[in-house]
Amino acid sequence: MIGLFFVIFNDVCSNHELDSQCEHMWRNKTILMKNTMRILSIGLVLVTTTFGSVMINVSARKTTNLNGKWHIIIDPYENGYYNYRYEPSTNGYFKNAQQQNRWDLLEYSFDTDEMLTVPGDWNSQQEKLLFYEGTIWYKKSFDYELPEKRRLFLYFGAVNYDAKVWLNGELLGGHEGGFTPFQFEITDRVWKKDNFIVVKADNKRFKDAVPTVNTDWYNYGGITRQVLLIETPESFVKDYFIQLKKNDRKIVAGWVKIDGNHLAQLIQIDITELGISERIMTDKAGFGRFEIIKEPVLWYPENPKLYDVKIVTGDEIICDKIGFRTIETSKNEILLNGKSIFLKGISIHEEAAYQDGGRAFSENHAKVLLGWAKDLSCNFVRLAHYTHNEAMMKTADEIGLLVWAEIPVYWTISWDNENTYQNAENQLTEMITRDKNRASVILWSMANETPLSDMRFTFLSRLAAKARQLDDTRLITAAMERHYINKTTQMIDDPFGKIVDVLGCNAYIGWYDGLPEKCRTMTWQTVYDKPVIISEFGGGALYGIHGDELTRWSEEYQANLYRENIAMFRKVDFIKGISPWILKDFKSPRRHLPQIQDFWNRKGLVTDKGDKKQAWFVLKEFYNKK
Ligand code: GCU
């Protein structure tokens, strides 16, 4: 643990050159440090159990972004956190330096070390970090003049995978899970000058994590989304949910949650274009509900109507753009605004196109990826296999794409580990909390391709119950597998199918399972009277490789595989949507084939440079005629 001080307090010294002045300054800090160490060691225990709830719609608030260059220390052995016995330590280098007054023993210096850009994964920023999995320390200094009667929060869009955060040498807390936001209140800890944030970001994979050690995507590590300082009034609008009442397109309903010391107050919901200006009183817990009889223009992919919504309190106005629609099922139909719809989709990993590469995080990244999906004539996207950044959801709202959102309960999760479940449930809660006002999101997916077992059924059923408790307006799904009941019949009868509203099913006929012509004799059955989405099918092709329809890795092979699979799925009446795998080639450490894959999964319909393969045109033609 003392090593951590190294990383933190050395930073302070190095801000002022490591000399007698620093030593003098340091002695004054020693007392602070000893006290802080006790806090740190206590804080360490808390870190693994505290998940804070996060305010929503951060872009609508008074924010200062801390994006840009951060100093880093690459620390594969976590020297800044453990001693040589691998315990949070009071020894470490620093203790020796202090005891022996040997400042030459200092072996860290943030401000003369390297830098990384935030937001952004480290793997795609530096060649030497391409496969790095471990800890990198980040440090950022800032000044902040916080006015009286105002509060300040430090917000992270995401850190993959495990984050521990200190401000001015004090542990704020931690977060586990690489794809959802978290925040810490720093109102009483922020200094006017020379604040410094230290983040320990660790993307090591481990069995009981969510996801577990084995995935088919790149383990992009680091502060992968934006970091904001968010200033709020003493009492502020922390959370709200404004939608059409479930299964009633004539009632705009919702609730607002105030945080602070003035919880019971009169607030106003304004939707001027609908002639709504509704005053409600929040209760002593800060909670207020409303229902207003109104018939908004409904949100559709082909007409993504968004309304300007304002929540007005005595201290602030929070603005949002919200679409109104209903989503439900009736037997094996999916009904958008009461009308049956076929989901013409594509799966997407959160990986930026063109020269950016790496984890996508920005509005521009979202506009490229989702613009391609619109270009493909999609009305639907499966954002696999984890919660994508908020720009993806807001862009889908604006350009008109329905969304399957997902948490990374992927493959062989530790079903019997309660900490693993709590982590999964927390990531689910953070996803739904952040995105529940996005009309585009219609499906919450609990999992992908998880092996059948009683523990898995219990684990996923608990998640589904939690999702419905948080949001009973959307549909619950998961990507499951199928199995043969004879040589030519696929059966979809996953026990979790009893719990979900819509069944996802992944099937690679013509790629992992026979040749594309095998589709011609295949039939499909399900034991459920529920809609099925083929949440994955596809095959690989290296752009520019040509041959006949049996030449594996050629564009012709992939195009023919799409033709055969589409012809097969068209014959199955309970299939109400497809999201083929996948929009864009994406990086994966599992894909080695030299000169073909080179650590890329080549099932994309476009390359990372946007070159369209022949299969793109096959799928687009099908969607245009659907
Ligand atoms: C699986 C899995 C994907 C993976 C794909 C593939 O279905 O869900 O994450 O990338 O197959 O093999 O390409």
Image (cartoon, helix red, strand yellow):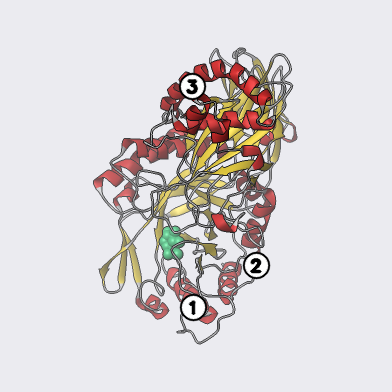
Amino acid residing under circle 1: Trp
The disc placed on residue 426 is none
Mark positioned earlier in the residue sequence (1 or 2): 1
Q: Residues within 10 Å of mark 3 (few under 14, many from 20)?
A: many
Mark positioned earlier in the residue sequence (3 or 2): 3
For numbered disc 3, what is the local secondary structure? helix
Displayed quadrant of residue 254 = top right
- Looking at the rendered image, the quarter that the C terminus falls into is bottom right
Choose mark 3 or mark 2, whichever is in front: 3
Please state which of residues 69 and 586 is positioned toward the viewer in this rendering. 69
Q: Position of residue 175 (x, y in %)?
A: 49, 35
Q: What residue sits right under mark 3 in the picture?
A: 37
Label 1 and label 3: CA atoms lie apart by: 57 Å
Q: Is mark 2 within 8 Å of ligand 1?
A: no
Left or right: where does residue 307 sit relative to residue 539? right
Residue sitting at the far bottom = 548
* Residue at (66, 15) in percent of width and height: 266
* Residue at (53, 29) in percent of width and height: 5
The disc placed on residue 553 is 1
The disc placed on residue 610 is 2
For numbered disc 1, what is the local secondary structure? loop
Displayed quadrant of residue 586 = bottom right
Amino acid residing under circle 2: Gly
Q: Position of residue 498 (x, y in %)?
A: 32, 47
* Residue at (67, 52) in percent of width and height: 399
The answer to whether one can see residue 325 in this image is no
- Residue 435 in the image: above or below residue 183: below
Q: Quadrant of ligand 1?
A: bottom left
Q: Position of residue 168 (x, y in %)?
A: 61, 25
Mark positioned earlier in the residue sequence (1 or 3): 3
Displayed quadrant of residue 458 = top left
